Image (tube, grey):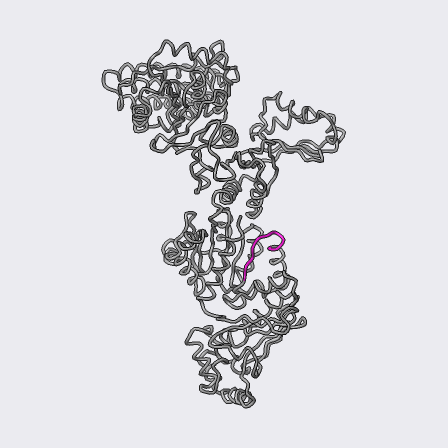
Amino acid sequence: MIVCKFGGTSVGSVEAIRQLVSILQDPDHKGRVRVVVVSAFSKVTDTLIAIARKAEQGNGTFKDDVSQLFERHREVIYRLLPAETQGPTEGVVRSLIEDLERILEGVARLGELSNRTLDMVMSFGERLSASIIAPICTAAGMPADYLDARLVIRTDDRFGNARFIPEETYPAIRSLLQNRPHLQIATGFIGATLDGKTTTLGRGGSDLSAAIFGAAIGAEEIEIWTDVDGILTSDPRLVPTAFRMDSISYEEALELSHFGAKVLHPPTVLPAMEKGIPIRIRNTFNPSCPGTLIAREVPPSPYPVRGISSLREVALIRLEGTGMVGVAGFSARLFSALARRHINVILITQASSEYSICCAVLPKDAPEAAAAIKEEFESEIARSAIEPPVIERDLSIIAVVGSRMKSTPGIAGKVFHALGRNGVNVVAIAQGSSELNISAVISRQDEAKALNAIHDAFFLAGLRSVNLFLVGTGLIGGTLLDQLAQQQEILADRYKIRINLIGVANSKHMLFDAAGIEPARAREALLSQGEPMDLDGFISRMRAFNLPNSCFCDCTAADTVPSRYLDILKSSIPIVTPNKRANSGLLSYYTALTEYSRERGIPYLYETTVCAGLPVISTLHDLFLSGDRIRRIEAVVSGTLSYIFNNFDGSKPFSGLVWEAKQKGYTEPDPRDDLNAMDAARKVLILARECGMPLEFEAIRVEPILPPSCFTAPTVEAFFEELKNHDQSFEERRRRAAQQGKVLRYVAVIEEGKAELRLREEGEGSPFRSLVDADNMVVITTDRYSVLPMVIKGPGAGAQVTAAGVFADIVRIARTLV
């Protein structure tokens, strides 16, 4: 025998009820189902509560709402029942509606709505539903009786959340069913006290009703039919990557349901667990899916945890003081005080010092809980042995559940690393000795981020994702988008790294999409769908998404965006950038950024600020970490200047080479922005700071390349005319060097706390003679690389290599994830 329960959405429409009938008639259920427990039609219970509140307030429109309720049920009757049974069924429903109206009129006259009366009002939802579904099943060839569960489910008198009494209930169910051979369509959610007063079993209590019937008759299985495929690893509304679990144990189901897993009412498991009856969660709208089995013995999970759930709204009551330390019976007094007020404690945690203790309760219970504690410890508070209780609100509880957690090292570390890595502050922690559950109290605004971060850490451990926010879609940013588009699928399929472009902006527009923006069409979408760009607005929106594993990428060249880097890092969002402005600005800002990143473990990656994609910054970091000491750095760090002097062999005048470099895109629109060596100086300053030198920009000695008259030329064209006037002097310097077997190179030298850039004559044996085209080269002399220095050489300019370096840093962000 099987007991089935169909929830509100499963009886929420004509189509859903047709599907219910189809399930009961399929080969797996036909002739095997003894009891079907039904909920009220979708949203009807909420409607009944709202109508009752209106009546209490004297709002006469509640009668109109009751009429609409009748019409909704009447429509189902006339669409699903044959003509000969429509009238009698409508008569039953009309009689129930009239009873409801009489009760509501009494509420309106008294202006009072007690919990007992509210239970009676709410009971009409299930009574209406079952009264209609029973004749529908009969008409479909399955003779069925309406069963008012108040006849058999006996409870205490805690109206609103009554507890059923097994020793009274089970015999009553068995006795009644002996005299009813047909299929029973029973009301869920409701019961009655021993003297016949209507009670409810708490919201979601229809699940419990099904478990009670199943336990009473010793069912083979209890099926809970709902609108999802089973119990998922987390709430799919908050965690899009959540997936169905094939099976879980009773204990795991209890933990998950207690901490907010909406698919199952928490008390449901207990009656089934006591009798050893499996529970299966199935989808009314996808009956081919096997759902999730809850049983005593289930196959071990391939994952170290079964699921992650959350309780969205809790309050924390904190009590502390020296008067607690070493005092026997203190906790007993605390929880007895709460119990006397019927306040349920969700979570408890106490410091080993015994100086503080805190417990989580529902927010509505927090004021009464604090009052109960003040009353109990009035004398201790009066003499300052204990501080008055403090209420912390706007909190959530995240619960990580699984039987494989028991005695498995590293589970808690993985949980809290995932939270810390994403800037989620933990207010309180609790773990039971059963090791089935690790619970953390966090800020409510971080609930979704925390769930996703932990879920990724355990269930997508092979797949590392980054949620990218990109500012700047010019030459480098645009090339990065092209590379992302080309490589996105390969990264996900082959290397298990997923990069989701969530936000993108240029100087005029910004665009966001939580589902992800296709990199290939991002620039087009910015123009057609973007809103006006506002940097503060972009950063605020990025924070508001509150996504785990976020990354901010700045591909601009301006000062504005870097000025916000510290704010972004303080939001626990890593930064990747080729923009040199932050690290070559004030030393104090550079220090603040790098120290905050290091201390908090929030990546700040800027490899491409010096030599495009060449691994210079990371190499210096590795040398420091390994204990080596940098003695000297010599470098050509400007791709533009490298191209000009690498090709300055006398075959072309100097001005011609500068013009050629401009035509090839190696220079800024005004080549003087490169030839003033300021960009190179900024790179050198960054290198010097990475070597531990506390230098400001003014300390960098820069030998001018051009005469002053070139910089005062009013236009670029005038600049080139003026530069031609100096071709002869450039050629004479080149010729003198050539006569000595040397070539000209513009080289930076960092040594003994000083840094300079100057035009040098490089003889035989100089590594800089091997430079070609726009290559950069960094020569590093250290204690370990003293006889033969380390040489890093390669393209130091160009959108492709720079964007590739930025891309590599974004991938490094993924590698830092759990």
Q: Residue at x 64, y 69 (%)?
A: 782
- In the image, 537 versus 412, the foreground residue is 412
- Quadrant placement of the N terminus: top left
Q: Is residue 602 magenta?
A: yes
| Residue 766 at least partly seen | yes
Percent coordinates x, y for residue 767 in the rendering: 55, 77
Percent coordinates x, y for residue 764 in the rendering: 56, 83
- Please give left or right for residue 463 compared with residue 407 in the image: left
- In the image, 615 versus 373, the foreground residue is 615
* Residue 582, above or below 308: below
Q: Residue at x 58, y 72 (%)?
A: 779
Percent coordinates x, y for residue 676 in the rendering: 54, 76
Percent coordinates x, y for residue 120 in the rendering: 45, 17
- Please give left or right for residue 735 compared with residue 356 in the image: left
| Residue 108 at least partly seen | no
Picture quadrant where residue 635 is located: bottom right
